[in-house]
Amino acid sequence: MASVPFDQLEGEIWFNGAFVPWKDAKIHVLTHGLHYASAVFEGERAYGGEIFKLTEHTERLHTSGEILGFKIPYSVAEIDQACTELLKRQGFTDAYVRPIAWRGSEMMGVSAQQSRINLAIAIWQWPSYFKPEERMKGIRLDIAEYRRPDPRTAPSRSKAAGLYMICTLSKHRAEERGYADALMLDWRDQVAEATGANVFFVKDGKIHTPTPDCFLDGITRRTVIDLAKRRGYEVIERAIMPDELDSFEQCFLTGTAAEVTPVSEIGPHSFTVGEIARNLVNDYMAEVQPKQAAAE
Ligand SMILES: Cc1ncc(COP(=O)(O)O)c(C=O)c1O
């Protein structure tokens, strides 16, 4: 399938306070963010014309920047307003929203205190992260070679571009080997998450998920924990070891892009797409609809 490169899409991008034509939203090759990964970003989805948990995402963007030592020069309210207006200008109701903040070109060395902090927001249509036909059958995960790092080694609470290097490597290797994605362990060899989504398991009617102490505590993860509790399911956050994988009956991923996606295999371990996973797929899809539309 030939697809249009992302720099050739149509519409506008919000770029440091102005709406600019999509193809003109360019930066110079000597940009600190490009060379030293001094960039943080968000991934959000709009449903029915509203961005789900927009302010929570924008607050996380601000926090991610602060963890990398910079302050984004637009308030949370200004960024929320820019995202909302851009969604309207792009004319989409269901879409993916990508704000990114990065250090500019004013200093080109490891140290970059005087660099300008830039912010851009792009919105495009991105229907389903995993192939829809695979999704309800459950996707297959490889086990990644790379580990999520110790929080003393990398700022793991920031949604920082640099942390995705090992995710891209792991996802490429998984796809080469015929899998949809990879499960990553952490530096202690505990189960951590997939390359762009959190992971949950089901055993004896209870939900188990790793404690997010060295990877992102996803906004979808927290939403799904609330939805599970609303249904009366017990949710246990704890350290999960890989030798437990065989004892779990169901498995699913959560993330803004992945939404709730059942998993059928992790390496040699198999899971069924059971009632709890299916209920949470449906509850999440209902939860993300704008409240007015949901009430109709
Ligand atoms: C590495 C990683 N973990 C977890 C998540 C899930 O986070 P959220 O549910 O906030 O999208 C994402 C997606 O942003 C991610 O990239």
Image (cartoon, rainbow, N blue to C red):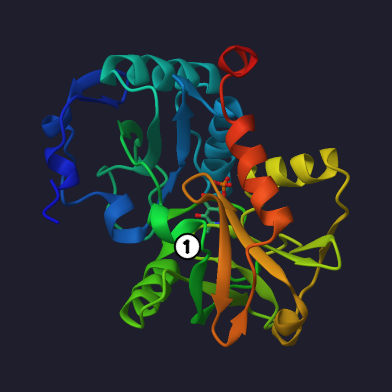
Residue 219 lies in quadrant: top right
Residue drawn at the location 70% of the way across and 78% of the way down: 190
* Residue 195 appears left or right of 9: right
**Which residue is painted at 57% across and 88% down in the image?**
268
Q: Which residue is more in the foreground, 64 or 66?
A: 64
Total residue callouts: 1
Q: Residue at x 35, y 44 (%)?
A: 103
- The vertical placement of 129 against 118, above or below, is below
Q: Please name the residue that numbered disc 1 is placed on.
A: 163
Q: Which residue is pictured at 47% across the width and 62% down the height?
A: 163
Q: Hey, which quadrant is residue 14 in on the image?
A: top left
Residue 280 drawn at (x, y percent): 68, 47
**Location of residue 230 with respect to 3 vertically, above or below:** above
Which of the two residues, 221 or 189, is positioned nearer the viewer here?
Answer: 221
Please provide percent x and percent y for residue 222: 71, 44
Q: Where is residue 217 in the image (x, y as percent from the top left)?
A: 67, 52
Q: What residue type is labelled 1?
A: Leu
Query: Is the CB of the residue bearing disc 1 within 8 angstroms of ligand 1?
Result: yes
